[in-house]
Amino acid sequence: MCGINGLYYFTQRTTDVNIIIKKMAEKMIHRGPDSDGFYTDKRVALGFRRLSIIDIEGANQPLYSENGKIKLLCNGEIYNFKELRQKLIKKGHVFSTKGDAETIIHLYEEYGKDLVHHLRGMFAFILYDSDKEEFLVSRDFFGIKPLYYYVDEEKFACSSELKSLLEIIPSRELDEESLAYYLTFQYVPFEKTMVKNILKLLPGHLMIVNKDGIQIERYFKPRFNPVAKSKEEYKAEIKEILYDSVSLHMQSDVPIGCFLSSGIDSTAIACLMSKFRRINTFSVGFEGPNNECVYSSQTAQFLNSIHHKWVIKEEEYFNSIPDFIHYIDEPVADPSAIALYLVSKLAATKVKVVLSGEGADELFAGYGIYQEPLALKRFEILPDSLKKWLNKIIKPLPDFYGKNYLLRGTTPLSHRFLGNAKIFTDEVKDILLNKKLVYKRPFEIVKNIYEDYKDLDPVKQMQIIDIYTWLPGDILTKGDKMSMANSLELRVPFLDIEVFKVASQIPTEYSITPTQTKAILREALASLVPDFIINRKKLGFPVPIAKFLRDQQGQEVLKTIKLSGIGKYINLNYIENLFKLHQRGKADYGRKLWTIYILALWYKMYIKNNNINDTQHIHLFKESTKSAKI
């Protein structure tokens, strides 16, 4: 696990890039505190920060081919590297390290850009072929590892972190179109970021960069293709592939542990890991009726794991926010992200690698909202024209019991489901001050995805929407950034390409019932996961944001928003009114207010550059793990 940076000049460069590439690397020292590495020539510069996990002594980067003509930087882990290594050795390839990343160089020599189809892992890499004077840049299937890029007439630049690219862009400007999308999704979806002209390489894509410019290609497109098999067959396949995935994800030359919540996903990973060895488990929670630590402690006792927990106080939560904003790169208004930062801080005191349960909900249909199509099934008999007419009649009526149900039932899925987060929708036009701003309305953003997957049933369509939006934009972004903020490698066995191949074939009726989500997964794991977890309803991570914003802290949050400078873009009178209604208990606007608060803090730090200096941040980073409560 590392941080990577690359510069490619379309014409022979005239500037000394050594200082630039080193500054870019310094911005992400938290991603790789163990060592660094650099390469420059007349056209390119490569910079690397390393967190040593496999072949600690030998696999420093950049890595080179035998003849030195191919150079590689890779962030991530290739889990099938041992199998690939043996095949490549039989073909005559000579390896100089025992690490996983070197397989990418030899696969490139064999297959060119098609090498990505041989990989099983999480990765973002930059490969430089000096004979062709060409970059091959790629990102993994689901977007577990990040890759940002910037391009102008002179150069192409890419990095694991947006903050590194701020070193080379001419000016810091907020992208107003992205702001409109952020207000709805609580993150910026797809390829754009909140900083104008800095983009993301999408999951399952690669790019070729040479003197003629850049070319982006898609190499992986997620598809669900249900196959008729018995439940018993699927249960056996699920257990087998998860066992295989977890065993591969446990490859490490450093201590390894597991995040443990109250849900089935992380519990399943911990149970499978415990089949191999006694493990360290890590949990955080908040005081109250839904304290995650209560349930995770029960599971830890069941597993006989070495358990570490932290019940987070409100003060600790808010004191962590400045560091969260620094490390997150993009504004992500998910309150659980800060809890993830703190559990990563806790874990980093004991291990260097953790496994976690991200991705299970998207692949195996685990969100409660996925049950909605079953609840609305009776509306399927109505003609679309009648549903449209009924919706138009019902919408202006005063509220009555069942009105929301009728509105949902008469609204097409493609006009009611955007993914797991939907903060502001039609209100965006009331919040933005720039009334001339041209942007797509929320449901227009996902229109092409619905059209592309119109052959799937509604539940599968919802899963696909989340795989394209929620998973990379929120779940994996916070997972990568918050773990790497603490120099901790986060691995996600459910998001293994071979696990996806099994999950993609499961018929919807096996996964979703009127009373249960992830039904087939629960059945498959019933003999492995304790009874008090197996059928527990999914709660998400219960951060008491609504409560936090109703006490004195809420006034401080409002003050911060007003002083941040986002009043240049946002109607602060509208937001202040929401605060008043929320604090009086007239409505719960906690998530909406939190979305604006995170935006305000991010804007102040990333656009106005009102930030503590790097030296202070490095000091905080080094000291942070010492204060974790175990």
Image (cartoon, rainbow, N blue to C red):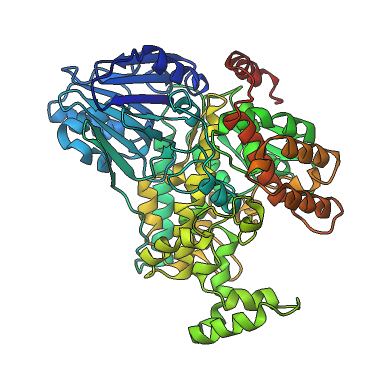
Q: Quadrant of the C terminus?
A: top right
Q: Quadrant of the N terminus?
A: top left
**Residue drawn at 36 percent across, 35 percent down:** 79
Q: Quadrant of residue 159?
A: top left
Q: Is residue 292 visible?
A: yes
Give x and y (percent) for residue 423: 63, 55
81 up-or-down from 460: above or below: above
Numbered marks: total: 0
Q: Nearer the viewer, residue 109 or 363?
A: 109
Q: Is residue 56 left or right of residue 113?
A: right
Q: Is residue 359 left or right of residue 90?
A: right
Farthest residue in the left direction?
92
Give x and y (percent) for residue 458: 47, 69
**Residue drawn at 53 percent across, 24 percent down:** 487
Q: Nearer the viewer, residue 243 or 225?
A: 225
**Residue drawn at 65 percent across, 36 percent down:** 338
382 up-or-down from 78: above or below: below
Q: Nearer the viewer, residue 58 or 24?
A: 24
Farthest residue in the front direction?
436
Q: Is residue 306 visible?
A: no
Q: Is residue 402 left or right of residue 267?
A: right
609 up-or-down from 537: above or below: above
560 up-or-down from 517: above or below: above
Q: Nearer the viewer, residue 172 or 360?
A: 172
Give x and y (percent) for residue 149: 39, 34
Give x and y (percent) for residue 505: 37, 61
Q: Is residue 451 left or right of residue 558?
A: left
